[in-house]
């Protein structure tokens, strides 16, 4: 039985000037969102993977730091258990778990993974098809992936060639958080062991022997959902200090982008494949002399209590091993058996950004960030104190609170205060606040 064809809806003629204005507004919103992010030191891209990101970022709306972190995670998993770094008596596998935190649409979290995956797929197609999974649900389910079966042993000896690598993408980490909160769910405990690259064996009714694993996780979530689903017991349990929180936002407005040129992706993938193979040959990764000197200073910086609020302190308490792991990944991909100063510098920049991101998640940085972005939109003209009070806050914020915000922004160098004589030459000079141009940020 056929149905009559639906009439086509007539698309109204679009005024080119209106379209231009809409695009300009969209770009302004992108710039405003990026101005609200913590400041990122561009030295974070001074590494092999960073240079790959720089070659493809112009054709992607993704935040470059999200693409970089995804590649770092994937590279650490792909190189396997051979390359590692030691911290005291503990061997650390090169596992880094980025928690990509961005708004639902403007964060472009999924876009960042799409960009990273194209490069990973071009470098290691079989690895992507075999070792990339989603759907974390229970500790037993994850342990089962590494459980020893009868076919894994030859004459009672476990096959040393077993592939223990697993790269997990969780685009809806909020759902995983909900599952971990269920009574009896052991996923949190198993994840803590997995970050160590260790034993995931279970002693439940359906016990499994899983003495070794090599798991990397890329998790996506919005800041609102993360805060709403998290409680103090989650942080105290130690699961989330294994993650590297990174605040992200859409980087640009590209209505016609089709992604990086396939030929470029193939070329970069071939280079990445060679670096991954080279890195997998490394074993214990140490320090060069200059890097050891730098590490002493970084160790003090990253392991010192900075009197943050408890949630932030707990979130960033593993900054030291995360920095080591990232630096070791950079060194391994350069085919180096020792971490150099350049590897540490890039790694520390990413960890510092992660610490700033953790603050942004748990502390009200949105209000001062939005104010700084609004001031920046005025360019060199700046905003007067009266405009800030009446236009930005619509008279709904106390003068003392505004003063605190302006002082905070001035102290961190984000705005500058000057005065302008009244046009009449009489009366008090107007306070003028100017800020950086958000469209020129490297972040």
Image (cartoon, grey):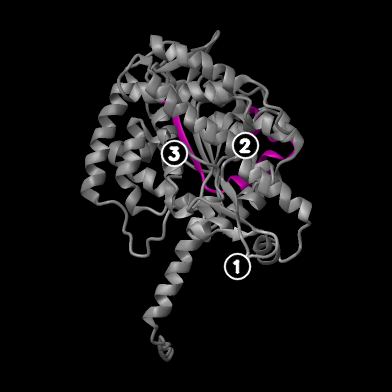
The residue under the point 71% across, 66% down is 394
Q: Earlier in the sequence, mark 1 or mark 2?
A: 2
The reply to whether residue 358 is in sight is: yes
**181 part of magenta stretch:** yes
Q: Is residue 193 left or right of residue 237?
A: left
Which residue position is annotated with label 3?
A: 70
Q: Which mark is residue 153?
A: none
Disc 2, SS:
loop
Picture coordinates of residue 264, whole percent (x, y):
23, 46
Task: Say which residue appears at 66% left-offset and 66% top-offset.
Answer: 391
- Ranked by sequence position, the earlier of labels 1 and 3 is 3
Camera-nearest label, 1 or 3: 1
Residue 138's disc number: 2
Query: Which quarter of the figure is the N terminus placed in?
Result: bottom left
Q: Which residue is mark 1?
A: 423
Q: Quadrant of residue 81?
A: top left
What residue lies at 67% left-to-right and 26% top-to-bottom?
306
**How much space separates mark 3 and mark 2, taking CA atoms?**
23 Å
Q: Are marks 1 and 2 in contact (CB under 8 Å)?
A: no
Assign a secondary structure to mark 3. helix
Q: Position of residue 429 (x, y in %)?
A: 65, 59
Quarter of the rendering containing residue 180: top right
Residue 398 against residue 151 in the figure, above or below: below
Q: Which residues are magenta?
A: 162-189
Q: Residues within 10 Å of mark 1 (few under 14, many from 20)?
A: few
Percent position (x, y) of residue 265? Answer: 26, 45
């Amino acid at each position: 039985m056929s149905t009559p064809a639906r009439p086509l809806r007539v698309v109204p003629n679009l005024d080119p000037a209106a379209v231009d204005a809409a695009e300009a507004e969209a770009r302004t919103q992108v710039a405003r969102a990026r101005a609200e992010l913590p400041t990122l030191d561009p030295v974070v891209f001074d590494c092999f993977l960073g240079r790959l990101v720089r070659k493809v970022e112009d054709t992607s709306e993704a935040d470059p730091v999200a693409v970089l972190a995804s590649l770092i995670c994937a590279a650490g998993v792909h190189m396997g258990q051979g390359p590692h770094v030691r911290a005291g008596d503990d061997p650390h596998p090169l596992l880094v778990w980025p928690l990509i935190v961005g708004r639902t649409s403007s964060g472009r979290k999924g876009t960042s993974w799409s960009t990273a995956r194209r490069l990973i797929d071009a470098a290691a197609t079989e690895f992507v098809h075999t070792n990339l999974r989603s759907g974390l649900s229970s500790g037993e389910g994850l342990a089962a992936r590494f459980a020893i079966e009868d076919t894994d042993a030859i004459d009672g000896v476990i096959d040393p060639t077993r592939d223990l690598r697993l790269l997990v993408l969780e685009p809806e980490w909020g759902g995983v958080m909900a599952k971990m909160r269920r009574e009896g769910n052991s996923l949190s405990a198993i994840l803590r062991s997995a970050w160590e690259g260790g034993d995931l064996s279970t002693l439940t009714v359906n016990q499994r022997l899983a003495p070794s694993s090599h798991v990397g996780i890329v998790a996506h979530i919005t800041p609102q959902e993360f805060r709403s689903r998290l409680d103090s017991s989650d942080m105290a349990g130690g699961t989330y200090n294994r993650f590297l929180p990174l605040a992200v936002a859409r980087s640009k407005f590209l209505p016609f982008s089709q992604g990086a040129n396939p030929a470029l992706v193939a070329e970069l993938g071939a280079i990445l494949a060679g670096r991954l193979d080279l890195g997998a040959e490394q074993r214990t990764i140490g320090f060069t002399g200059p890097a050891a000197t730098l590490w002493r200073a970084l160790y003090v910086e990253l392991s010192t209590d900075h009197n943050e609020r408890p949630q932030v302190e707990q979130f960033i308490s593993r900054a030291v091993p995360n920095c080591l792991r990232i630096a070791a990944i950079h060194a391994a991909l350069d085919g180096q058996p020792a971490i150099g100063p350049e590897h540490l510098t890039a790694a520390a920049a990413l960890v510092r950004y992660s610490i700033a991101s953790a603050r942004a998640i748990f502390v009200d940085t949105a209000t001062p960030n939005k104010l700084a972005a609004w001031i920046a939109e005025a360019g060199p003209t700046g905003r007067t104190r009266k405009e800030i009070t009446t236009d930005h806050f619509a008279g709904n914020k106390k003068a003392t609170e505004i003063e605190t915000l302006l002082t905070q922004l001035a102290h961190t160098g984000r705005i500058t205060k000057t005065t302008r004589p009244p046009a009449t030459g009489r009366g008090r000079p107007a306070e003028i606040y100017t800020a950086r141009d958000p469209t020129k940020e490297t972040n």
